[in-house]
Image: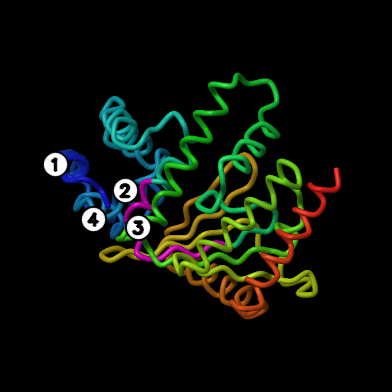
């Protein structure tokens, strides 16, 4: 959850937004139309229920002519150099979510990754960086993953395409370790992981990496990501469509018991490959 100090800072953000909006003579709906969000979301920003994305903070500055005040404040509250701008706000929302549902078509989701897996992915995407850069990214990934160990952790679902289990990211030994880590979390009932089998065919093609987050006191949010960008989706109609897509993926997946058996079988296959080399 957000600390008291951080929440107070977001409340200050919201109070300033309301004050400056009213000084400029805008209603919430009028400001929202210029910032490309609903008036209701402006109200939620002002009440510190929901945090804006960086682009929204910039557009607020432009509309209210506040000389970058809201962008600078956003960066102080959310900006973490270990994450891309488009993902920093997602990390903040993860801490507040009561339920997180993910679909991963190619690689293990960050919240489930081991250090070796995270290191291999970071190096694959950034082959010329320093060791310090790699370890900073890996540390950030593992820090996020602590969320699933916390007593107040959100309900966490993950649908993994079978290809995720077969790709030996970081080598066979590292992949065996990764899959056994997922299996352990599932057996400890900290997560619920389903596998979408290859036989599901076109079902997997209709969605890329996606995540749904539900909150105690705010509407649900969807997040989609590619290798180089991500989009946080707030529009209720869009979120509804994403939830339907996730329901279809879940319906086409193996049962929890069969999924766990396949994960452990794939881990054993990777272990054998590692021992054979």
The residue that mark 4 highlights is 43
- Of 260 and 129, nearer the camera is 260
Comes first in the chain, label 2 or label 4: 4
Comes first in the chain, label 1 or label 3: 1
Kind of element beneath mark 4: helix
Q: Is residue 107 above or below residue 74?
A: below
Query: Where's residue 77, x and y in %?
Result: 29, 36
Comes first in the chain, label 1 or label 4: 1
Q: How many marks?
A: 4
C-alpha span from label 3 to label 4: 9 Å
The residue that mark 1 highlights is 19
- Of 51 and 179, nearer the camera is 179
The residue that mark 3 highlights is 38
Please give the range of residues in magenta.
Answer: 92-102
Residue found 59% across the figure and 77% down from its top: 256
Are the residues at dot 1 and dot 2 in contact (C-beta closer than 8 Å)? no
The residue that mark 2 highlights is 51
Residue found 65% across the figure and 39% down from its top: 121
Density class for disc 4 (Cα within 10 Å; few <14, some 14-19, many ≥20) is: some
C-alpha span from label 1 to label 3: 18 Å
Comes first in the chain, label 1 or label 2: 1
């Amino acid at each position: 959850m957000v600390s008291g100090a951080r929440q107070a800072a977001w409340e200050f953000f919201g109070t300033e937004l309301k004050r400056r909006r009213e000084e400029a003579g805008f209603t919430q709906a009028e400001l929202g139309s210029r910032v490309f969000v609903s008036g209701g979301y402006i109200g939620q920003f002002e009440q510190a229920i929901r945090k804006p994305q960086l682009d929204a903070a910039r557009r607020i500055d432009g509309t209210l002519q506040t000389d970058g005040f809201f962008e600078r404040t956003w960066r102080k509250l959310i900006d973490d150099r270990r994450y891309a701008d488009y993902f920093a706000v997602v990390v903040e929302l993860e801490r507040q979510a009561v339920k997180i549902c993910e679909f991963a078509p190619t690689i293990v989701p960050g919240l489930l990754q081991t250090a070796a897996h995270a290191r291999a992915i970071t190096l694959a995407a950034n082959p010329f960086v320093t060791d310090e850069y790699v370890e900073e990214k890996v540390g950030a990934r593992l820090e996020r993953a602590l969320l699933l160990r916390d007593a107040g952790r959100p309900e966490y679902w993950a649908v993994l395409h079978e290809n995720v289990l077969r790709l030996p990211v970081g080598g066979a030994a590292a992949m065996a370790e990764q899959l056994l880590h997922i299996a352990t979390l599932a057996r400890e009932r900290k997560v619920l992981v389903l596998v979408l089998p290859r036989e599901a065919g076109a079902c997997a093609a209709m969605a890329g990496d996606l995540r749904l987050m539900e909150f105690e006191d705010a509407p649900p949010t969807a997040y989609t990501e590619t290798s180089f960008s991500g989009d946080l989706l707030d529009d209720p109609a869009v979120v509804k469509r994403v939830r339907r897509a996730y329901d279809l993926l879940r319906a086409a997946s193996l049962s929890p018991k069969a999924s766990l058996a396949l994960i452990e079988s794939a881990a054993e296959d990777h272990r054998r490959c590692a021992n054979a080399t």
